[in-house]
Amino acid sequence: MSTTLYWDSLVRHEDTTLFMARDSAGKFLAVHGKGEACDALEGSVISLPGGPVKRCPLTNANAAVVRRIFPFTRPVSRKGHPFTIGLGDRLGLASAGHIRLVRGMDVFPVLAQQSIRELNLTGRTYEDVLSAAGWAVFQEGYRAGYGADGDHLKTREEVQMALDCGFTMITLDCSEHIRNDFAALPASELESHYQALEPGLRTQLEGEYLNRSFPLDGGQSISFSAADLRRIVLVYHDAIRYTIALYDELLRGRDTDFEMSIDETLSTTSPEAHYFVARELQKAGVELISLAPRFCGEFQKGSDYRGNLSEFEKEFAVHATIAKTLGYKLSIHSGSDKFAVFPIIYRETGKMVHLKTAGTNWLEALRVVAAQEPGLFREILAFALERLPEAKKYYHITENTANIPDIGALADKDLPSLLDQDDARQVLHVTYGQILLDSSFKGPIFKTLERYEDAYCVALEKHIGRHISGA
């Protein structure tokens, strides 16, 4: 049985040598010698060409031991890093490719990034996510640091769970506290709802925001009409109050990167609303590392930006200036594959921005499957089309399955090209949960990607590299 060694993982600790390896049974941590590491790690003794070693499985328990002994495998804050990128890895197999890409680049990777929705749809836990990132860091001998983001968390319990697991970043999704019903309400009906608010709150906010101009960097300014202020307060006040209460209870005083997400709503975030939300949080002492507005146009899954580029450029420039003025970064959610707007985003922020990607890494995995196991890929696409209605309960896409080429008419060599077709990408993007929870697919997918690990890494380096360069 041949064994592949990952030489970049070789490390010494006291009288112990450790390294990652892979054989036909999968990856493992090899430990040779005596001391704390050898005693603390669970495993069994095997024989390798260089002598007996302790073969330790890549379990969560062993990952926790490695994080305790080797600090470079622990996630850290992304504070102080201008350009950061979230690299959601739904399979736990992509981080090696991400590391090979960012090594030596001026970008800080958040390797462990998952939402509760993604955990539920893949059957994983936050321990699994953090362990997968740590093992990849160990395997690649990566010492430059990485982050761990509990993404799109909505409740106190979810935030506490991510913190307890050691996540260094919390993205609070306030969508359930944003009153979208007020966003579209006629002005004639808005007044009664506004007057129902506490009189002291109305007086305070009107005194602070009306008949004033708030200067921004570069000579721009923000001001509020009475009508705009009333609508903004009604739409966002509950979300602001919820955020402050949760921050005070769980995050104040902790060295945790805090991001507020107001993007997963029906309401586009106006520059005035953005400024109001951020300023109210900062008045309450909330340390914002980044904020995710809902930009104009559509940031759909698995496809490029859809909307008016001139309008986006005009509004994004103001959002970027607000963030710069108030001292945090914009966060671009559903940032995968938005190549049309990357030049605008990077120019207007000077690459002081946080970009979130996730599903595009899964699509690159399927590209490898299509190239190496065409029969398996054909079955996956057929299954995905069948389960699409169920998947669309969780994700908004506007695919047209009639545009997907007839897979039966495609030669095996042409199957990877389906990963360049928008409608096929969207279908495969949102059905990942149904696919991965089906045992007839999960095992073969993992075996294929483990066997062709280098091919997967190369695909990720190429595709995510375009996100970083903006090309």
Image (tube, helix red, strand yellow):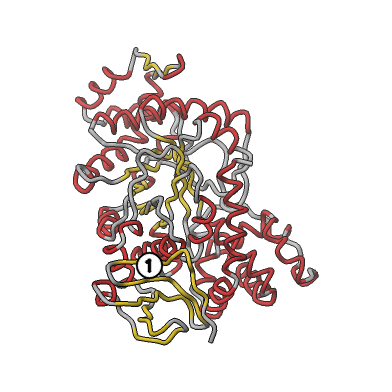
Residue 283 sits above or below residue 54 on the image: above
Residue 211 sits above or below residue 362 on the image: above
Q: Residue at x 37, y 67 (%)?
A: 128
Percent x, y for residue 156? Answer: 25, 53
Displayed quadrant of residue 39 = bottom left
Percent x, y for residue 331? Answer: 44, 40
Q: Is residue 120 visible?
A: no
Q: Is 70 placed left or right of 378 in the picture?
A: left
Which of 438 and 238 lies nearest the eye of the viewer? 438
Q: Is 449 placed left or right of 204 in the picture?
A: right
| Residue labelled with disc 1 | 128
Amino acid type at mark 1: Asp
Q: Is 228 placed left or right of 238 in the picture?
A: right
Q: Is residue 461 visible?
A: yes
Q: Residue at x 49, y 56 (%)?
A: 99
SS at badge 1: helix
Q: Is 197 placed left or right of 379 in the picture?
A: left
Which of 278 and 47 lies nearest the eye of the viewer? 47
Q: Quadrant of the C terminus?
A: top right
Residue 163 sits above or below residue 338 on the image: below
Displayed quadrant of residue 252 = top left
Percent x, y for residue 260? Answer: 36, 42
Crowding near pointer 1: few (<14 within 10 Å), some, many (20+)? some
Q: How many marks?
A: 1
Q: Residue at x 42, y 67 (%)?
A: 10
